[in-house]
Image (tube, coloured by chain):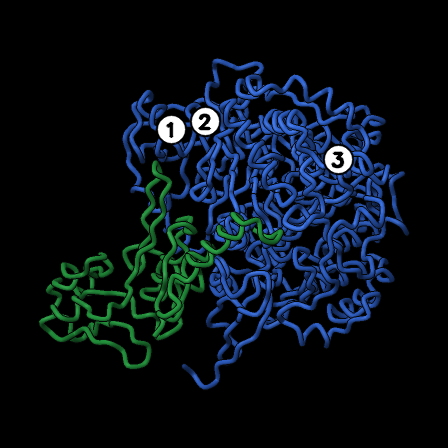
Chain colours: A blue, B green
Amino acid sequence: MSQTRQVFQTLCRMCDDHCAINVYMEEGRVVDIDGYAEHPWNRGRLCSKGRAAVDLVYHPDRLWKPLKRTPSGWQEIPLEQALDEIAGKLASIRDAHGARSIGVWKGEAVGFAQQEDLARRFAHAIGSPNYFSNDSMCFNGRWIGYSTVHGAWSVPDYENTRLVLMWGANPPHAHPNMTQMIMRARRRGGKLIVLDPRLSAVARQADLHAPIRPGTDGALAWGLIRALLERGAYDRELVANHSVGFPQMQAYAERFTPEYVEGETGVPASLVGEIAAALAKAAPAVVNYVGNGLEHHENGINNIRAVAYLDTLLGALDRKGGNRLAEGFLTNRLTLYQERPLTELEPIGAERFPVLYGMRQECHTMTALEAILSGRPYPLKAMVLTAANPAMTNPNSEKVRRAFGALELFVVRDLFLTETAQLAHYVLPAASFLERSELHAHAMFQVVTLTRKLLSFPGVQDEYQFWHDLAHRLGAGAYFPWKNEEELTRWLLEPSGLTLEQLAAHPEGYPYRPVRYEKWREKPLRTPSGKVEFTSQYLKDLGYPELAEYKPPSYLSSPDPEYPFVLVTGARKLLFYHSRFQNIERFARAGRNPEMEMHPADAARLALSDGDRVRVSSRVGTIELPVTVTAPNEIPPRTVQITHGYRQANVNLLTPDDVFDPISGFPLMKALPVKVERLGTEVTPRSTMP
Amino acid sequence: MRIVTMDPDSCVACRNCEYACAFKQAQTFERRDSNIRVNFYPEERVCIPGTCVHCEEPWCLEVCPAAAIRRSPDTGAVEIDPERCAGCKMCLLACPFGAIRFDARARVARKCDLCGGDPRCVKFCISGALQYVETEEAFGFRRASFDAHLMQMFGKGDQP
């Protein structure tokens, strides 16, 4: 080992888990990364993506200079010139079409914390209400589902639980670090029940795995509600003193007999009773956890709401071992929704999806792309997008490309020339997470950690500097008064009474508030009524059902014989974060990438062998890729799965951008009618990543 | 002496251990370069990680005609010296756990050397199925699980 080797602690940002890491450096260069043992979040363990930050930072394809599109191709230009030109064009578009014709779009390739609020701040600072992000199809659905019931999206108290009930979530691949928490719970005698059409990685260790039909989770949740009520196994104190709408819920639950539930979900009636009995036995220490799998459905939000009802019935709401209501870390607020709400400027999607905007101030990306193409309800002419890749991750990719292509000005900041960046007029190099410092709170443990800036490269700006420089050029500098990121963080910290120096001295996380339970005893929940809302007046007033009514997915209620398979998209792969990291060669070579998972009986019927190529078509588009024939229990018959993010076979060429959950506006991406055809016998090598 | 213990009741066959080992051994993510292997049997829903347990009387070491296998005085790991290995594969035959692999490119046998006392497979095991523990405490998690079971049986405490 070199004598000059030094080690620093920070948080990983290769996915949203934010595991604590040791970063080993030699002569100013990162040479290795592993898990940092002292942080309560990951206790020294780390997944392979974390180590790959070394590859990412020094990747030969990384962007180091601004690029400008010219008729003869990309031209490298100096940063100051790029910012001047971009600001000039934004100003003339603002003059011609109004500030709201400029959109800001946040992605996740460079961060997840202050980055979001900086983008929101910039949009409002220059006078546009149009902030977009990947969150109009991820995260917000669960946030809305839980918050309309409890006033918050709770965090799982794995470390004290007796039973984990997982709905459409696969932590080993999606939130790797939760895996050790779940397995610790199992070692203490806790049980694990996994509800997922696929035998996901976490389902491999489940005490019970129920392969539920995609999009039918609401029916099962109602079946469990009915079974618990029938047994009288519910928390009477919580229901009587801290909820509204119990009688309506009780009445609606009646129809969800085990037999009806079996007919909808494919989960045997006897199993419904078995799961309800396990829940009743473990209550209140039940983690009732919903993953992204439930969001991308036509009835997604109400399915999630029905699942959330269980927390209250089981008494798991904010109880030890249940779903805890985390207390956030209080900072100064970066967004300008109080100072400059700009709602009179009609944020894109706010009228169509008032809950998404009303609860999350999130404009709707699918509507934005429509608006770019149609000019309605008003022209959207410019987009400044930071580290998102909607050309791969938004539904109907072909239309996404057309829409971005129709912009007068499209600016993309990223580490790489992504599929989205290739459509831009200007591409600016962005800083990786090792090149900036920000605050991150782990709500599960209520600790806050300051990430550490370990590297800097000339001409590569951090998020703050970019928005700062652009705002100052557009006459909105007053909103970005801080000299740099460090000054900004000092200001953010003011209400906490903590200093940067204090936080820097605690790489293991600073406990900002002790973890407490049953806070609903002391203060009202953050719902309109202050109570658990089985019925929501807020939703009712907007024209939605007040209860979390169940509606069968349309592939079941009105099947189309032309498209006999149901396609689930977006099952996570360990080594990729959405469309990211496919450019790390050893990741791409670690398995069959891309692939379509298929049941052996379906493969036999289509005369398909493992590795054969297939053509998959929906009413939106067609792609071709190899098939992976799974074991019979890994995916149900008539169901196929394709993970998103592969440039060789982009599954979002198949997904529609006109079928939405009516409450959240989330697109249908996980229960899509498709057809599958055999393409000959060219064989791709056997998958090594089961 | 510490060893890597493996718990098939926690492993989810995510293969992070294989990736971490292959990367340490050969800078790849290829399973053939890994000294730890996870076998996954989907229909039985069984995940079994397997690597060397550094036997007190290692048959691989005894059978090696080239005296290429020795115990490290620092870590206690049973290690193969690739410089001395003749590629005869008798150690693969001798190991009752199948924990030795043959590197067909370098034409030598390979096995776990505990990464010199800081095994990467354990650091990159996200489920906790792998632990690097003193042999005296090895598989202590089984006792802890049993204790939890007993406590539940007798209704002690509100914790499982």
Mark in the foreground, 3 or 2: 3
Given contact means CB atoms under 8 Å apart, are the residues at marks 1 and 2 in contact?
yes
Instruction: Using the image, name the chain to which the residue with label 3 belongs.
Output: A
What residue does disc 2 label? A639
Q: Residues within 10 Å of mark 3 (few under 14, many from 20)?
A: some
Choose top left, top right, bottom left or bottom right for residue A310: top right
- Left or right: residue A278 versus residue B135 is right
Task: Specify whether disc 3 shares its chain with disc 1.
Answer: yes
Pick whichever of labels 1 and 2 is earlier in the sequence: 1
Q: Which residue is mark 1?
A: A599
Callout 1 amino acid: His
Q: Secondary structure at mark 1?
A: loop
Q: Amino acid at mark 3?
A: Arg
Tag of residue A236: 3
Q: CA distance from mark 3 to mark 1?
A: 44 Å
Q: Position of residue A217 (x, y in %)?
A: 59, 29
**Circles 3 and 1: CB distance less than 8 Å?**
no
SS for tag 3? helix
Q: Is residue A498 left or right of residue B19?
A: right
Rounded to the nearest angstrom, the CA distance separating label 3 from label 2 is 40 Å
Measured as percent of width and height from the top left, residue A586 is found at: 39, 56
Quadrant location of the C terminus of chain A? top left
